[in-house]
Image (spheres, rainbow, N blue to C red):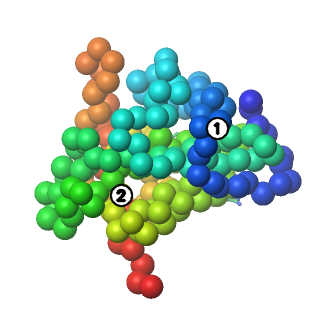
Amino acid sequence: MNQKNSSTSAPIIRQRRNADISEAAESLVEVHATDGYPVEGVDQPEAWLTPPGLIQAWVAELDGHIVGHVAISRSNGEEAVSLWLKHGQGIEEKTAVMARLFVIRGARKSSIGERLVGAATEYAEQKGVRLVLDVMAKDMAAIRLYERLGWQKLGPTTHTYGDGDRTDAVCYVSPMASAA
Ligand SMILES: CC(C)(COP(=O)(O)OP(=O)(O)OC[C@H]1O[C@@H](n2cnc3c(N)ncnc32)[C@H](O)[C@@H]1OP(=O)(O)O)[C@@H](O)C(=O)NCCC(=O)NCCS
């Protein structure tokens, strides 16, 4: 929908409803065109937004349109989970994966990305769960966001997709819950 950043209304961050998925999928297709995210492509954007083990997803709504998204899922053999467990501070049952984060280009640089990550981490803290993620090394805006919010680097990994294509990625763990 190519939402321009000229909106005067405040973005709303809220839990995703089933009715949001088709518009979130349209925004994802737009982000893939502008940023090449996700690297594996968006042949089935609605399915990609609803991965197996999905725990919860949030959207950013601006002027009645879905302009951003994030989700957390149960761990499913991800390298970020393995690296976190190797660290010796976490247990798999209390670890979840944050993914599917994006904001369409026309709505960026208004802290929507920060608020989406904040919604996911706040939810995880309430459940006593630590979040991990992997981010492609090319996605520098996302890396800056995670590091600004205090996510700790766990180490590098390689993301494999398509017909054996590979790209460098980095794994992170969310900051420790702040003391009440
Ligand atoms: C990563 C991403 C979600 C960030 O979304 P966003 O809404 O722009 O994030 P924020 O607004 O919170 O922060 C982005 C920048 O805007 C700046 N900013 C935030 N509010 C601002 C304001 N009111 N005025 C000026 N700058 C502002 C932040 O300081 C930050 O600056 P930096 O990139 O120089 O560090 C977005 O760039 C994106 O969708 N990228 C493509 C998909 C992707 O890479 N996903 C990651 C998956 S792991």
- Regarding residue 27, the answer to whether it shows in the image is no
- Residue at the spot 29% in from the left edge and 33% down from the top edge: 159
Give the number of the mark in front: 2 or 1. Answer: 1
Nearest to N terminus: mark 2 or mark 1: 1
Instruction: Tell me whether circle 2 and circle 1 mark residues in contact (CB < 8 Å).
Output: no
Left or right relative to 120: residue 88: left
- Residue at the spot 32% in from the left edge and 24% down from the top edge: 161
Instruction: Please state the total of marks drawn on the protein image.
Output: 2
Work out which residue is located at the far front of the displayed protein and give it.
18
Residue 2 x, y percent position in the rendering: 74, 32
Residue 156 x, y percent position in the rendering: 25, 46
Q: Which residue is mark 2?
A: 131
Judge by depth and name the residue closer to the eye, 159 or 116.
116
| Quadrant in the rendering for residue 10 | bottom right
Quarter of the image where the C terminus is located: bottom left
Note whether ligand 1 is within 8 Å of mark 1: no
Residue 137 x, y percent position in the rendering: 37, 41
- Residue at the spot 42% in from the left edge and 38% down from the top edge: 138
What is the CA distance from the residue labelled 2 to the residue labelled 1?
24 Å
**Given the image, on which type of amino acid does mark 2 rest?**
Leu
- Near mark 1 (Cα within 10 A), the count class, few <14, some 14-19 or many ≥20, is some
- Residue at the spot 42% in from the left edge and 48% down from the top edge: 55
**Given the image, on which type of amino acid does mark 1 rest?**
Asp
Q: Secondary structure at mark 1?
A: helix
Residue 91 x, y percent position in the rendering: 19, 61
Instruction: In the rendered view, tell whether residue 49 sits above or below residue 165.
Output: below
Q: Secondary structure at mark 2?
A: strand
- Regarding residue 143, the answer to whether it shows in the image is yes
Note whether ligand 1 is within 8 Å of mark 2: no
Instruction: In the rendered view, tell whether residue 118 sits above or below residue 133.
Output: below
Q: Which residue is mark 1?
A: 20
